[in-house]
Protein backbone atom coordinates (compact mmCIF):
# COMPACT_ATOMS: atom_id res chain seq x y z
CA UNK A 1 0.00 0.00 0.00
CA UNK A 2 2.76 2.36 1.02
CA UNK A 3 4.68 1.82 -2.22
CA UNK A 4 1.49 2.36 -4.24
CA UNK A 5 0.96 5.64 -2.45
CA UNK A 6 4.53 6.66 -3.11
CA UNK A 7 4.25 5.72 -6.76
CA UNK A 8 1.09 7.80 -7.03
CA UNK A 9 2.85 10.77 -5.47
CA UNK A 10 5.81 10.43 -7.82
CA UNK A 11 3.63 10.25 -10.91
CA UNK A 12 1.55 13.18 -9.62
CA UNK A 13 4.63 15.32 -9.24
CA UNK A 14 5.93 14.26 -12.68
CA UNK A 15 2.62 15.28 -14.23
CA UNK A 16 2.68 18.55 -12.31
CA UNK A 17 6.19 19.26 -13.53
CA UNK A 18 5.10 18.66 -17.11
CA UNK A 19 2.03 20.83 -16.69
CA UNK A 20 3.87 23.73 -15.08
CA UNK A 21 7.00 23.41 -17.18
CA UNK A 22 9.24 22.74 -14.19
CA UNK A 23 12.55 20.96 -14.01
CA UNK A 24 12.87 17.80 -16.05
CA UNK A 25 15.11 15.98 -13.58
CA UNK A 26 18.05 16.23 -15.97
CA UNK A 27 21.15 17.91 -14.63
CA UNK A 28 23.21 20.41 -16.56
CA UNK A 29 26.86 20.88 -15.60
CA UNK A 30 28.08 24.47 -15.71
CA UNK A 31 31.74 25.51 -15.48
CA UNK A 32 32.66 28.95 -14.13
CA UNK A 33 36.17 30.19 -14.94
CA UNK A 34 37.12 32.95 -12.52
CA UNK A 35 39.50 35.78 -13.55
CA UNK A 36 42.01 33.86 -15.71
CA UNK A 37 43.44 37.26 -16.74
CA UNK A 38 47.02 38.11 -17.66
CA UNK A 39 47.52 40.35 -14.61
CA UNK A 40 46.72 37.44 -12.27
CA UNK A 41 48.81 34.92 -14.25
CA UNK A 42 52.10 36.63 -15.17
CA UNK A 43 51.25 40.34 -14.86
CA UNK A 44 50.97 42.76 -11.94
CA UNK A 45 49.70 40.11 -9.50
CA UNK A 46 50.97 36.96 -11.23
CA UNK A 47 52.35 33.91 -9.43
CA UNK A 48 54.08 30.68 -10.44
CA UNK A 49 51.10 28.76 -9.09
CA UNK A 50 48.75 30.73 -11.35
CA UNK A 51 50.95 30.04 -14.40
CA UNK A 52 50.92 26.34 -13.52
CA UNK A 53 47.11 26.03 -13.72
CA UNK A 54 46.71 27.58 -17.21
CA UNK A 55 47.13 24.18 -18.93
CA UNK A 56 44.79 22.29 -16.58
CA UNK A 57 42.14 25.05 -16.88
CA UNK A 58 42.31 24.83 -20.70
CA UNK A 59 41.79 21.04 -20.53
CA UNK A 60 38.91 21.55 -18.08
CA UNK A 61 37.14 24.04 -20.38
CA UNK A 62 37.55 21.70 -23.36
CA UNK A 63 35.70 18.99 -21.44
CA UNK A 64 32.55 21.15 -21.34
CA UNK A 65 30.28 22.17 -24.21
CA UNK A 66 31.08 25.83 -25.05
CA UNK A 67 27.54 26.92 -24.14
CA UNK A 68 27.95 25.59 -20.59
CA UNK A 69 31.03 27.65 -19.71
CA UNK A 70 30.84 31.06 -18.01
CA UNK A 71 33.79 33.28 -17.12
CA UNK A 72 34.47 36.40 -15.09
CA UNK A 73 36.86 39.30 -15.59
CA UNK A 74 38.07 41.48 -12.73
CA UNK A 75 37.49 44.97 -14.14
CA UNK A 76 38.79 48.25 -12.74
CA UNK A 77 38.98 51.80 -14.06
CA UNK A 78 41.82 54.32 -14.10
CA UNK A 79 40.68 55.43 -10.62
CA UNK A 80 41.54 52.02 -9.14
CA UNK A 81 43.94 53.39 -6.52
CA UNK A 82 41.12 55.59 -5.15
CA UNK A 83 38.69 52.69 -4.73
CA UNK A 84 38.21 50.79 -1.47
CA UNK A 85 39.99 47.75 -3.00
CA UNK A 86 42.83 49.95 -4.28
CA UNK A 87 43.43 51.48 -0.88
CA UNK A 88 43.93 48.02 0.66
CA UNK A 89 45.77 46.57 -2.35
CA UNK A 90 47.64 49.46 -4.00
CA UNK A 91 48.74 47.47 -7.06
CA UNK A 92 47.05 48.56 -10.28
CA UNK A 93 45.66 45.51 -12.07
CA UNK A 94 42.95 44.53 -14.54
CA UNK A 95 42.41 48.10 -15.74
CA UNK A 96 39.68 47.80 -18.37
CA UNK A 97 41.07 47.60 -21.91
CA UNK A 98 44.69 46.82 -20.93
CA UNK A 99 46.56 43.60 -21.80
CA UNK A 100 46.62 42.69 -18.11
CA UNK A 101 42.80 42.84 -18.00
CA UNK A 102 42.44 40.42 -20.92
CA UNK A 103 41.81 36.73 -20.32
CA UNK A 104 44.78 34.52 -21.27
CA UNK A 105 44.49 34.21 -25.08
CA UNK A 106 44.45 30.38 -25.11
CA UNK A 107 41.51 30.48 -22.68
CA UNK A 108 39.69 33.47 -24.21
CA UNK A 109 39.35 31.73 -27.56
CA UNK A 110 37.44 28.88 -25.90
CA UNK A 111 34.84 31.21 -24.39
CA UNK A 112 31.51 32.48 -25.66
CA UNK A 113 31.80 36.31 -25.49
CA UNK A 114 28.24 36.66 -24.17
CA UNK A 115 29.16 34.35 -21.25
CA UNK A 116 31.95 36.61 -19.98
CA UNK A 117 30.93 38.74 -17.00
CA UNK A 118 32.92 41.85 -16.04
CA UNK A 119 32.86 42.41 -12.31
CA UNK A 120 33.97 45.52 -10.41
CA UNK A 121 34.74 43.61 -7.22
CA UNK A 122 35.38 40.08 -5.90
CA UNK A 123 31.98 38.43 -6.15
CA UNK A 124 29.57 38.95 -9.06
CA UNK A 125 25.85 39.33 -8.47
CA UNK A 126 25.42 39.39 -12.27
CA UNK A 127 26.98 35.94 -12.56
CA UNK A 128 24.77 34.71 -9.74
CA UNK A 129 21.66 36.01 -11.50
CA UNK A 130 22.66 34.46 -14.85
CA UNK A 131 23.12 31.07 -13.22
CA UNK A 132 19.84 31.40 -11.33
CA UNK A 133 18.19 31.92 -14.73
CA UNK A 134 19.95 28.84 -16.16
CA UNK A 135 18.74 26.89 -13.14
CA UNK A 136 15.16 27.94 -13.87
CA UNK A 137 15.46 26.32 -17.30
CA UNK A 138 17.17 23.17 -16.11
CA UNK A 139 18.69 22.19 -12.78
CA UNK A 140 22.40 22.95 -12.78
CA UNK A 141 25.44 21.95 -10.83
CA UNK A 142 28.34 24.35 -10.86
CA UNK A 143 32.08 23.72 -10.94
CA UNK A 144 34.41 26.68 -10.32
CA UNK A 145 38.06 27.03 -11.32
CA UNK A 146 40.46 29.97 -11.62
CA UNK A 147 42.07 32.79 -9.67
CA UNK A 148 42.52 33.57 -6.89
CA UNK A 149 41.22 30.76 -4.71
CA UNK A 150 41.25 32.90 -1.57
CA UNK A 151 39.58 36.03 -2.98
CA UNK A 152 37.43 35.74 -6.09
CA UNK A 153 36.92 31.98 -6.30
CA UNK A 154 35.72 31.71 -2.70
CA UNK A 155 33.61 34.91 -3.01
CA UNK A 156 31.74 33.59 -6.04
CA UNK A 157 31.41 30.06 -4.68
CA UNK A 158 29.73 31.39 -1.53
CA UNK A 159 27.46 33.76 -3.47
CA UNK A 160 26.35 30.85 -5.65
CA UNK A 161 25.81 28.69 -2.57
CA UNK A 162 23.54 31.40 -1.15
CA UNK A 163 21.60 31.80 -4.41
CA UNK A 164 21.30 28.07 -5.14
CA UNK A 165 21.34 26.32 -1.76
CA UNK A 166 19.97 23.01 -3.10
CA UNK A 167 22.42 22.78 -6.00
CA UNK A 168 25.84 21.15 -5.97
CA UNK A 169 28.57 23.80 -6.05
CA UNK A 170 32.19 22.65 -6.11
CA UNK A 171 35.73 23.72 -6.96
CA UNK A 172 38.56 21.77 -8.57
CA UNK A 173 41.55 22.61 -6.35
CA UNK A 174 44.03 21.56 -9.07
CA UNK A 175 42.62 24.28 -11.37
CA UNK A 176 42.79 27.08 -8.77
CA UNK A 177 45.65 29.08 -7.31
CA UNK A 178 45.76 31.48 -4.37
CA UNK A 179 47.67 34.63 -3.56
CA UNK A 180 49.95 32.24 -1.63
CA UNK A 181 49.86 28.43 -1.34
CA UNK A 182 48.91 28.87 2.33
CA UNK A 183 45.94 31.15 1.64
CA UNK A 184 44.87 28.78 -1.19
CA UNK A 185 44.68 25.92 1.35
CA UNK A 186 42.87 28.12 3.89
CA UNK A 187 40.23 29.08 1.30
CA UNK A 188 39.67 25.44 0.32
CA UNK A 189 39.04 24.67 3.99
CA UNK A 190 36.60 27.60 4.29
CA UNK A 191 34.69 26.39 1.23
CA UNK A 192 34.53 22.82 2.53
CA UNK A 193 33.17 24.11 5.85
CA UNK A 194 30.47 26.00 3.92
CA UNK A 195 29.53 22.83 2.01
CA UNK A 196 31.11 23.84 -1.26
CA UNK A 197 32.68 20.66 -2.58
CA UNK A 198 36.45 20.49 -3.10
CA UNK A 199 37.73 17.91 -5.58
ZN1 LIG B 1 40.76 43.59 -8.46
Image (spheres, rainbow, N blue to C red):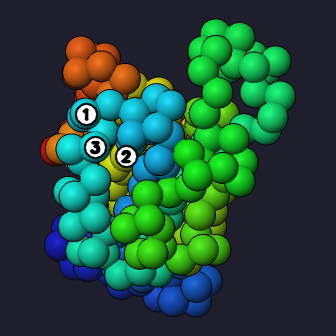
Total numbered circles: 3
Q: Earlier in the sequence, mark 3 or mark 2?
A: 3
Q: Select label 2 or label 1 by which is in front.
A: 1
Residue 5: x percent and y percent?
28, 73
Q: Earlier in the sequence, mark 2 or mark 1?
A: 1
Q: Is residue 187 above or below residue 65?
A: above
Residue corresponding to mark 2: 146
Q: Can see residue 193? A: no
Q: Residues within 10 Å of mark 3 (few under 14, many from 20)?
A: some
Relative to 9, does residue 55 appear above or below in the rendering?
above
Image-based side of 30 in relation to 51, left or right: right
Question: Residue 115's image quarter?
Answer: bottom right
- Tag on residue 48? 1
Q: Give percent across and percent down for residue 52.
A: 21, 44
Assign a secondary structure to mark 2: strand
Q: Residue 51: which numbered mark, if any?
A: 3
Q: CA distance from mark 2 to mark 1?
A: 14 Å
Q: CA distance from mark 1 to mark 3?
A: 5 Å
* CB within 8 Å, label 1 to label 3: yes
Q: Secondary structure at mark 1?
A: helix
Amino acid sequence: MLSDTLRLRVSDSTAARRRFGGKSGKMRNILVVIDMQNDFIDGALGTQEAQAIVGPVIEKIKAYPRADVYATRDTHGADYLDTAEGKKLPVEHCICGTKGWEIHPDIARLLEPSHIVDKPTFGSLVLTRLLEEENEQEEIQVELVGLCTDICVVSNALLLKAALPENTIYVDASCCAGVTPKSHEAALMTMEMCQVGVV
